[in-house]
Image (cartoon, rainbow, N blue to C red):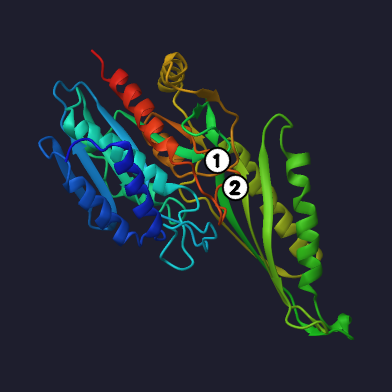
Amino acid sequence: MAELNEQDLIDIRRHLHTIPELALHEVETQAYLEKVIAGFRQDYLTIKKLDKLPTALLIHIKGSDTHKTIGYRSDIDALPVTEETGLSFASKHPGRMHACGHDIHMTVALGLLSYYAENQPNDDMVFFFQPAEESESGGLIAYELGAFEGEYRPDEFYALHDNPQLPAGAIGCRQGTLFAGTSEVDIDFTGKGGHAAYPQDANDMVVAAASFVTQAQTIVSRSLNPIESGVVTLGKIEAGTVRNVIAGKARIEGTIRGLKQPVLETITARLKDLGEGVARSYNCQVDMAFDQGCYLPVVNNPELTTDFIDFMKADPDVDFIETQPAMTGEDFGYLLSKIPGTMFWLGVEDNEPLHSAKLSPKEAAIGRGVNAIKAFLDHRMAR
């Protein structure tokens, strides 16, 4: 097979869109990726798999005059969302959808890989098709399994995320933090249930939970430096069974986000203080769990990102947009904490936001994205 053309890429994207799979279960997706890659010229390619992360796929490309190794990562998992696009190539898997655009991510990566399979790069390259970005910390698992050891260790690492708010094919980036770090939060309050008519004999955890939720809203406004950014969202509360029974238990589930790791640590510490304070005030028990996994802030490397931005600005074929940081999370932040690199946006122009059941990226972005990234990677390998 020759280098993938624009129609090939659209066909691939549409097939990937029909077969979304959740974190660590991307079996059909991986098999399709392998099938496509098997059709490329194999002269310079070596494929590596991980026994303990079986849906991961790494491809090493041998360079012609290697001075470094350039890494490129694409996530491959989908979300537990029921698609509502009405597209002819909508998800065939009920309750699952590529609502975050990872089908676009994979297609762009395949376009790049097909180019370098046909046109041997100067430097070595590693393409990483990563499972479990949306949950389960796939990047961290792969790193700890030694995925990037030896010739598979990139000296610099790149990845994109599609952005429906940017014009189709536009490239967006910024110095510093691109995406926030995120952590999941679970809080359980335990008191004593009882009859609604005898509150003196019970210990109402609805009241305790309500107090906690109200106080938690002061953390960002009163515990953080006003010029720093953080978010506390407590999106789910469960308590009680019927209207005339006082609830003896309450569970709160939420997420916290910060553009800097110390911000996340401050929010976590304050939530712990508040939980312990509410437990003392209401004479109940509190159990709190925080799980950041590998969702660290996505902090771009200064030197590599300067080069990326300067190149994209200078390329007349690229619509470059300097973007603001976003409170979305991405586990590429963990890999960037280990390996210098840059993450950037690819515009896909849609009225629906990421994670929407109606997200429908403009496919014109795919070819433009491949061309812009290919030109930059060639620039990074220029002698």
Identify the amino acid type marked 2: Glu
Residue at (28, 36) in percent of width and height: 5
Quadrant of the rendered structure where residue 6 is? top left
Side of 337 relative to 144 (left or right): right
Side of 307 relative to 51 (left or right): right
Looking at the rendering, which quadrant does residue 317 occupy?
Answer: top left
Query: What amino acid is labelled 1 in the image?
Result: Pro
Disc 2, SS? loop
Q: Position of residue 25 (x, y in %)?
A: 35, 62
User: Can residue 150 be seen here?
Assistant: no
Of the residues under marks 1 and 2, which one precedes in the sequence?
A: 1
Q: Residue at x 46, y 47 (%)?
A: 101
Residue 356 image offset from top left, x and y in percent: 57, 53
The CA distance from mark 1 to mark 2 is 7 Å
Q: Nearer the viewer, residue 281 or 292?
A: 292
Where does residue 90 sit, x and y in percent of width and height?
45, 59
Image mark for residue 84: none
Q: Quadrant of the C terminus?
A: top left
Q: Disc 1 vs disc 2: Cβ atoms closer than 8 Å?
A: yes
Q: What residue is pinned by disc 1? A: 164
Residue at image position (77%, 49%) is 217
Q: Secondary structure at mark 1?
A: loop
Q: Name the residue beneath numbered marker 2.
A: 352
Depth check: give the residue in front, 354 or 209: 354
